[in-house]
Amino acid sequence: MVRTRWPWISLLLGVIVALNPIGLDFLRSAFFSGEQLSRNIAQPIVLSALAILVLVGIIEWLVRFVVFKRRARGAS
């Protein structure tokens, strides 16, 4: 049952991916590493993963929006 339009599943997935030990290592390598090569390798990976998570969140929001509209239309 859809109760909210907020894409909470995608948000939870993003938090799990970012806050596990591998995700934290990639974030450190991408933005806080002292080596340029490490930053150049990790930044595109992290930014691509962020773009994918944003896209999944938008898709989830759109699906929830359509389901919400259909249920509201059917109830009246």
Image (spheres, rainbow, N blue to C red):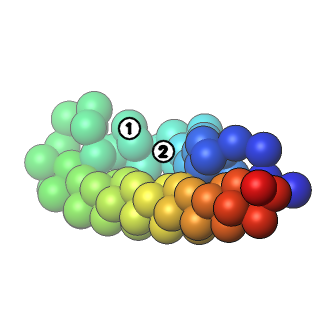
Instruction: Say whether marks 1 and 2 touch (CB < 8 Å).
Output: yes
Quarter-wise, where is residue 28 in the image?
Answer: top left
The disc at residue 25 is: 2
Q: How many marks?
A: 2
Q: CA distance from mark 1 to mark 2?
A: 5 Å
Q: Identify the element where label 2 is drawn.
A: helix
Q: Identify the element where label 1 is drawn.
A: helix
Is 59 located above or below residue 43 in the figure?
A: below
User: Outermost residue toward the front?
Assistant: 76
Which quadrant would the N terminus be assigned to in this image?
bottom right
Q: Is residue 1 left or right of residue 15?
A: right
Which quadrant would the C terminus be assigned to in this image?
bottom right
Q: Nearer the viewer, residue 18 or 30?
A: 18
Q: Position of residue 20 (x, y in %)?
A: 65, 44
- Residue positioned 51% across, 63% down in the render: 62
**The residue under label 2 is which amino acid type?**
Asp
Q: Is residue 49 left or right of residue 36?
A: right
Is 76 located above or below residue 27 in the figure?
A: below
**The residue under label 1 is which amino acid type?**
Arg
Is 40 located above or below residue 29 in the figure?
A: below
User: Outermost residue toward the right?
Assistant: 1
Q: Is residue 10 visible?
A: no
Q: Nearer the viewer, residue 38 or 54?
A: 54
Residue for badge 1:
28
Q: Is residue 57 visible?
A: yes
| Disc 2 crowd, CA 10 A, few/some/many (<14, 14-19, 20+) | some
Q: Is residue 35 left or right of residue 63?
A: left
Q: Position of residue 65 (x, y in %)?
A: 57, 58
Q: Is residue 56 left or right of residue 46?
A: right
Is 32 located above or below residue 51 in the figure?
A: above
